[in-house]
Image (cartoon, grey):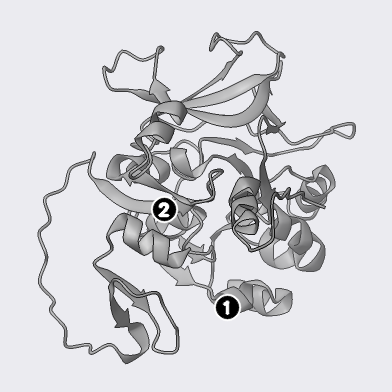
Amino acid sequence: RQGFMLDDCQAKCLLTFSTETVPEGASRIDLDTLDSQGPAHNPALAQSSESIAYIMYTSGSTGQPKGVLVPHRAINRLVINNGYADFNAQDRIAFASNPAFDASTMDVWGALLNGGQVVVIDHETLLEPSRFAQVLQDSGVTVLFVTTAIFNQYVQLIPQAIGGLRILLCGGERADVASFRRLLDLAPGLRLVHCYGPTETTTYATTLEVKAVAVDAECVPIGGPISNTQVYVLDARQQLAPLGVVGEMYIGGQGVAKGYLNRPDLTAEKFIADPFSHEPDALLYRTGDLGRWLPEGSLECLGRNDDQVKIRGFRIELGEIEAKLVACDGVKDAVVLVR
């Protein structure tokens, strides 16, 4: 899988460690043995807001991962004047997300593009609750994003540490109502933000600042679109669905990626011309997520219209695993289920 991604994006170099075995193809730079006397010049690459900032690979239903082409404008729209979090120069934002997960875009650029500081938290520390709590407090972290699965656990295990943040963001899976209610009771001054968004729309497309959870609530809505973002719930004919009626969620605006690398067929299927925009090249991304508008104006996410699943915040196309199983000797067909 790593070899495919290196070859697909034509990477010129690979940042790694000398202890790691990596696929052949790109020149490797071992960070633990790096000569600090390397060139310090500015490469002065020609850039614009439409230039590609990064290519991030997500699981693919056809058996191969697919590279999402994210432009610079999408990152700016995520972290500057975004409408959901007032990142500033006094913030210390935890870089606790896996770099292969698009939440890391906010972790890094939410701080750096607003004059704040990035606090790097390694994976082992993140998964050790008491150690993680100590790092949050000792380093003065003010902003943190965690996946819903980790959020649900840490509300139980280290509520004081996460309740002491300025802003806590979470998302990636269906939210547990009880966890939100408990944390709000323990930390009423915390800004708790529920987030939703596929990699193709650059980390967050919608957010909801959760201030209270009703006693009879069965879900935590995903709110409404962040700045420079539009969200539509459309029916099977791609017409606007009425209030309360379930449809597929389509996302437009500055956060939409420029398609998939080397996959014109899939790009044409998932990125369609935006019929609601006056911009000639504007695109809508078909999320494959089902949702509906609630009477109070928030969106509720209701699941998928295909076989994609979320496990600990990571989206996984079951077809990618099935394709690998079918490639094994003696296997005629395979079906993968989540238990």
Q: Give the residue type that dot 1 points to.
A: Asp
Residue sitting at x 39%, y 74%: 23
Mark 2 → mark 1, Cα distance in angstroms? 32 Å
The spot of residue 189 in percent (x, y) is: 67, 50
The spot of residue 151 in percent (x, y) is: 71, 57
The spot of residue 40 in percent (x, y) is: 13, 76
Residue sitting at x 67%, y 25%: 291
Residue 75: numbered disc? none
Rendering quarter of residue 235: top right
Rendering quarter of residue 224: top right
Q: Give the residue type that dot 2 points to.
A: Met
- Can you see residue 38? yes
Q: Earlier in the sequence, mark 2 or mark 1?
A: 2
> In the figure, 202 relative to 161: above or below?
above
Q: Is residue 324 left or right of residue 57?
A: right
Residue 138: numbered disc? 1
Q: Nearer the viewer, residue 40 or 58?
A: 58
The residue carrying pointer 2 sits among few (fewer than 14), some (14 to 19) or many (20 or more) residues within 10 Å by Cα, namely: many
Mark 2 vs mark 1: give the one in front. Answer: 2
Q: Decide: marks 2, 1 in contact (CB < 8 A)? A: no
Q: In this view, does 27 lie to the left or right of 140?
A: left
Q: Which of 75 and 234 is in front in this view?
A: 234
> In the figure, 231 relative to 322: above or below?
above
Q: Nearer the viewer, residue 250 or 308?
A: 308
Question: In the structure shown, which secondary structural element does the residue marked by tag 1 occupy?
Answer: helix
Residue sitting at x 74%, y 65%: 160
Q: In this view, does 125 lie to the left or right of 225?
A: right
Question: In the structure shown, which secondary structural element does the residue marked by tag 2 occupy?
Answer: strand
Residue sitting at x 22%, y 44%: 51
Q: Mark 2 points at which residue?
A: 56
